[in-house]
Image (spheres, rainbow, N blue to C red):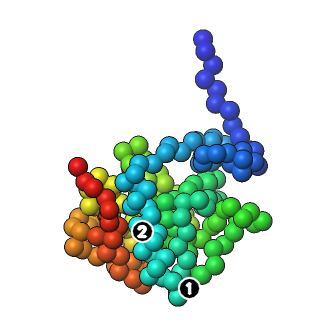
Amino acid sequence: MVSTIKRRYTLDEYRAIEEKAEGRSEYRDGEIVPMSGGTLKHSRIGRNILTYLTSVLRDTQFEPINNDLRLWIPEHRRGVYPDVMVFDGEPQLNGNRFDEVLNPALIVEVLSSSTADYDRQSKFRMYRSIKSFSEYLLVEQDEPFVERYSKQAQGWLLSEFNSLEQSITLESVGIELVIAEIYHGVVFE
């Protein structure tokens, strides 16, 4: 019989590996999970959102960050790389780490067929444990479709957008995000 015991890593071991790695991996409470590469559409959408947010939020207290920075979710012992995060004020570093933050207000994930269920379910549940987190965008890459979840007193409210002519009110940062800007240069089959 073949043994299928998976190696467990300490958080320090993961961080040491991640500092030297050419690719990125998520940390899932002892398990290291390599992240797959993205598509051209995925990259364009992520870039478009980051560029738009950076431009519109330039002279405000909000700071958009790309997916090079790891978000640490203490309650779930997870280290993940959202496609885009926006911080209200200075990003809070995790202790003396300069590569991990704790306090995004807005998180954006560009969906792929391999991550859509994880992003909508498990990852969203973990994100909700972050006190500063109040808005979540899930962006389809194969058609103009965005799901926006906003934190309300009674729970999370879902709004859906499926037209390039629509705009999304981002309450967490006080701006409108134009759907056409998200998909600029993206060709749908």
Residue 59, compared with residue 67, is above or below; it is: below
Where does residue 67 sit, x and y in percent of width and height? 54, 60
58 or 158: nearer the eye?
A: 58
Left or right, 121 with reference to 101: left
What's under tag 2, amino acid-wise? Ile
Corner quadrant of residue 13: top right
Q: Please tell me which residue is depicted at 57% across the width and 54% down the height of the picture.
A: 80
Residue most extreme to the top: 1
Assign a secondary structure to mark 2.
helix
Report the number of numbered marks: 2
Alpha-carbon distance for marks 1 and 2? 18 Å
Left or right, 156 with reference to 88: left
Residue 73, compared with residue 167, is above or below; it is: above
Q: Nearer the viewer, mark 1 or mark 2?
A: 2
Left or right, 35 with reference to 136: right
Whether pointer 1 and pointer 2 mark residues with C-beta atoms closer than 8 Å, the reply is no
Is residue 188 at least partly visible in the picture? yes
Tell me if mark 1 has few (under 14), some (14-19) or many (20+) residues whose alpha carbon lies within 10 angstroms of its own: few
Label 2: which residue? 49
What's under tag 1, amino acid-wise? Gln
Q: Please tell me which residue is depicted at 78% across the width and 65% down the height of the picture.
A: 96
Label 1: which residue? 61
Q: Please tell me which residue is depicted at 63% across the width and 42% down the height of the picture.
A: 32
Query: Could you tell me which quadrant the N terminus lies in?
Result: top right
Residue most extreme to the bottom: 59
Corner quadrant of residue 167: bottom left
Residue most extreme to the front: 185
Is residue 118 at least partly visible in the picture? no
Where does residue 104 sit, x and y in percent of width and height? 55, 70
